[in-house]
Image: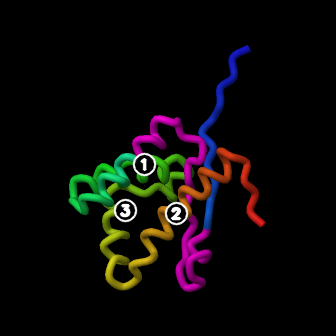
Amino acid sequence: MKLNFPKIVKEFSLTEYAPEVEGVISVWVNPSMQLLADLSSTFTAYSESRGAEKFDEFIIIVSQLLSQGKPETHFSVDELRELYEQTKDSDPTFWMWFNTRILDLISEHRYGIKKN
């Protein structure tokens, strides 16, 4: 028997960050190990260099993770760049929270971690 295993997408609400922030984010939680390794290496390179090229490499992968659900929930690279620019001065902890929440959903799914 051949099993066709689908992409699994789970959601989180931006109100988890702050009640004033609205929106639902859809995350592909069962990407390949290679994509996760690429995400990790591009994040490390971006964090160490702070260069625009490394940032773009990182958000290309984040865009893939956020563009597998309903079309209206997809995030393009340009939209992620804009989100970063909008929040980096006014709410600098948001970007790190946003990326951490994405990774948390993937980990929860991959390792069977249940939220309390």
Q: Magenta segment, which residues? A: 13-40
Disc 3 marks a residue whose amino acid type is Leu
Question: Any mark on residue 40, and which?
Answer: 1
User: Per the image, is 99 magenta?
Assistant: no
Does the CB distance between marks 2 and 1 fall below 8 Å?
Answer: no
Question: Any mark on residue 29, and which?
Answer: none
Judge from the rendering whether residue 12 lies leftward or rightward of residue 53; answer left or right: right
Q: Earlier in the sequence, mark 3 or mark 1?
A: 1
Disc 1 crowd rating (10 Å Cα; few below 14, some 14-19, many 20+) is some
> For the residue labelled by badge 3, is the local secondary structure a helix, a strand or a loop?
helix
Q: Measure the alpha-carbon separation of dots 3 and 1.
A: 17 Å
Residue under label 2, please give it: 100
Residue under label 3, please give it: 80
x, y (%) of residue 27? Answer: 56, 53
> For the residue labelled by badge 1, is the local secondary structure a helix, a strand or a loop?
helix
Q: Earlier in the sequence, mark 3 or mark 2?
A: 3
Judge from the rendering whether residue 12 lies leftward or rightward of residue 83; answer left or right: right
User: Per the image, is 33 magenta?
Assistant: yes
Between 71 and 102, which is closer to the camera in this rendering?
102
Residue at position x 78%, y 66% from top? 116
Disc 2 crowd rating (10 Å Cα; few below 14, some 14-19, many 20+) is few
Q: Measure the alpha-carbon separation of dots 2 and 1.
A: 12 Å
The relative height of residue 47 versus residue 90 in the rendered view (above or below) is above
Mark 3 or 1, which is nearer the eye?
Answer: 1
Question: Quarter of the image holding residue 4?
Answer: top right
